[in-house]
Image: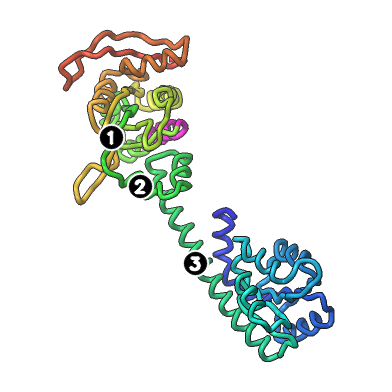
Amino acid sequence: MNEAVRAKDAGNAHGAAQAPYRILIVDDDPDMSAYLALLLRKEGMATEVAHDGESAITRVLTSPPDLVLLDVMMPGITGFDVCQQLKSDPETALLPVVLITALEDQDSRVRGIEAGADDFLSKPVNREELLARVKTLRRLHETRKELENRRLAAEVARKEAIRAAFSRYISPRLAERIIGGSGASEELFSSRPQRTTVVALFADLRGFTRLTERTEVSQVVAMLNQYFTILTEAAYQHDATIFNMAGDALLIGFNVPFAQEDAAMRAWLTAQEMVTRFAPVALEWEKAHGLATGVGIGICMGEAILGNVGSPHYTSYTIIGNTVNTAARLMQLAAPNEVLVCGEVQEEIRNAIADARIESRGDVTLRGRSEPIPVFAVRVPGT
């Protein structure tokens, strides 16, 4: 049963409690089953009858009752076997089963208990005893159902809260994967810092500072929201993790929190999507405000530290280290609609795309680094 169905069941718990209490009577004696049905209907309960174990199991699976009165001695499979089968199935394990038997020996009682019976009635059935046991089990069963509905509703609410929180950082596919994993949701974002290989991508909106100087504040916010929507949708399409938005810059990572063997290619495809999707918006902005703009992107692959960084008052789950700094410096060098990458990322792209348009920018000494590194520009198709 999926979460949507469980949530619906939980929400309809009150309505279900108002429906007639349904009892399945299983007895091969037509007179006995008719007698039991008459007694129960007089108390406002709905009854159904099955005359053998096989048909009883079929009825329970197709239209589960609220309680089963089950004769022990029947042709075919016995009441003990029916009870054991129902109690062994997770879907019917909580269904109350009362065994009705003329057997008074201790071994039969023990066998019934081992089969999972909730209670016993002896033949000939006494009316007051029957009604007392049914009413007691009815209250117990309704309490169980209410507790189960509350538990399911709480579980659905918990997972929805986790999904909403995770969706701020990662794609819906990764969020579902985290939620579906046993214990993973509690561990991934609260684990101790770790050193791991990442592909960091920084994207920045070129010329936006000048654009804000001639634009109303409300328009600036709307434009930024439009810009970040395009970039985050491109990131989610390739299962990136969003680590930071600052001003008009965006930091995303790949190969975290889950391993991605094609992380470098995912980063390049994301960069390509960002530039391509934003291009028509940039043209609209230029016509409206008279200033050209575009996305500048830097990508680098290497080791980084992953973990929660901050103070007791504010914490951010992020990646830090030389790889991240290099991606930021490459972004700062990139022209509008240009993607600059380090050597490792360039090799991954070249190996995967034979006709990739890659241009060497030579060895560049980036701010904060003592040694120059090879820098490459990867041209986005159509630019």
Disc 1 on helix, strand or loop?
strand
Magenta stretch encompasses residue 114: no
Q: Which residue is mark 1?
A: 319
Q: Going by the image, does 290 lie left or right of 67? A: left
Q: Is residue 199 above or below residue 346?
A: below
Q: Is residue 370 above or below residue 91?
A: above
Residue neighbourhood size for the residue with mark 3, other residues' Cα within 10 Å, grouped as few (<14), some (14–19), many (≥20): some
Tag 3, which secondary structure?
helix
Q: Which mark is residue 150?
A: 3
Magenta stretch: dominant secondary structure: helix
User: Badges 1 and 2: C-beta atoms under 8 Å apart?
Assistant: no
Question: CB under 8 Å between callouts 1 and 3?
Answer: no
Which comes before the other along the chain, label 1 or label 3? 3
Specify few, some or many for label 2: CA neighbours under 10 Å numbering under 14, 14-19, or 20 or more.
few
As helix, strand or loop, the secondary structure at mark 2 comes to helix
How far apart are labels 1 and 3 at the CA level? 39 Å
In the rendered structure, which disc, 2 or 3, sits on the residue that comes first in sequence?
3
Determine the image quadrant of residue 96: bottom right
Q: Is residue 242 left or right of residue 137?
A: left
Q: Over which residues does the magenta segment extend? A: 225-238
- How crowded is the residue under tag 1: few (<14 C-alpha within 10 Å), some, or many (20+)? many
Q: In this image, 88 relative to 191: left or right?
A: right
The residue identified by callout 2 is: 187
The mark closer to the camera, 2 or 3, is 2
**Dot 1 amino acid type:** Ile
Please, is residue 162 above or below residue 114 in the view?
above
Side of 319 where 58 appears, left or right: right
Q: Nearer the viewer, residue 109 or 374?
A: 109
